[in-house]
Image: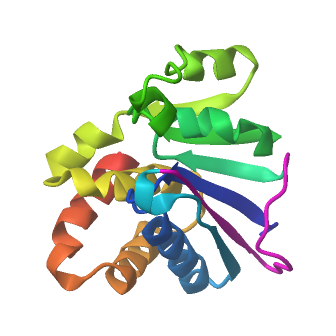
Amino acid sequence: MKTTNIMIVGVGGQGTLLASRLIGQAGLKAGYEVKLSEVHGMSQRGGSVVTYVKLGDQVYSPVIKEGEADFIISFEKLEAARYADCLKKDGRIITNIQQIDPMPVITGAAEYPEDVLEKLEEKGVAIDKMDALSLAMEAGTSLAVNIVLMGRLSRYFDISEEIWMEALEAVVKPAFIDVNKKAFALGRA
């Protein structure tokens, strides 16, 4: 497998780190070399958080530069727009359609941009958008948005669902495994 570059972007507290660990575990269990890197923003204050995951037969560096991402997984639609320049020409954004106002919007210093996803699509960006929050709630908790998005991402890989489930069991606490398996299945469906 050629190296696949995945950026996971979101707002602090949304579970980007758990999502990157899940992809990493699935990649390792499927026999790939995996590298992870975290870039913490103002995560404790709801700021932007980015994690990088690279997997393939041979991976040299965990960092993903502008124009190198095969996938951008966005937990919030403005974060998708913020990092769209990192996407390859034939890459894909998988995003939650949820809107989480950043601090400048909350304080009234700025307005949340309208139609951010539609503007990206007009530029030719491939976007797989979904209401991951509603699916997470259907699974049993709003905290599973990250796992719903991982379920959707799994559709784009030649890694079996069984391996994804083993990876999920390796990174999620046993008390939360059932709800997360349901969230993953809903995202994958």
Rendering coords of residue 130 (x, y %) = 41, 34
Rendering coords of residue 166 (x, y %) = 38, 81
The color scheme shown is rainbow
Q: Which residues are magenta?
A: 47-67
Magenta stretch: includes residue 146: no
Residue shown at 79%/79% (left/top)? 57
Residue shown at 67%/22% (left/top)? 120
Could you say which quadrant of the image residue 169 lies in? bottom left
Rendering coords of residue 12 (x, y %) = 44, 57
Could you say which quadrant of the image residue 54 lies in? bottom right
Tell me if 12 is positioned left or right of 31 in this view: left
Using the rendered image of the protein, determine whether residue 155 is visible from the camera's viewpoint.
no
Q: Is residue 62 above or below residue 73?
A: below
Magenta stretch: includes residue 53: yes
Tell me if 164 is positioned left or right of 61 in this view: left
Q: Nearer the viewer, residue 182 or 102?
A: 102
Could you say which quadrant of the image residue 8 lies in? bottom right
Tell me if 54 is positioned left or right of 95 in this view: right
Give the number of callouts.
0
Tell me if 150 is positioned left or right of 89 in this view: left
Residue shown at 24%/38% (left/top)? 134
* Quarter containing the N terminus: bottom right
* Quarter containing the C terminus: top left
Using the rendered image of the protein, determine whether residue 145 is visible from the camera's viewpoint.
yes
Rendering coords of residue 114 (x, y %) = 52, 14
Q: Is residue 2 above or below residue 173?
A: above
Q: Nearer the viewer, residue 72 or 111?
A: 111
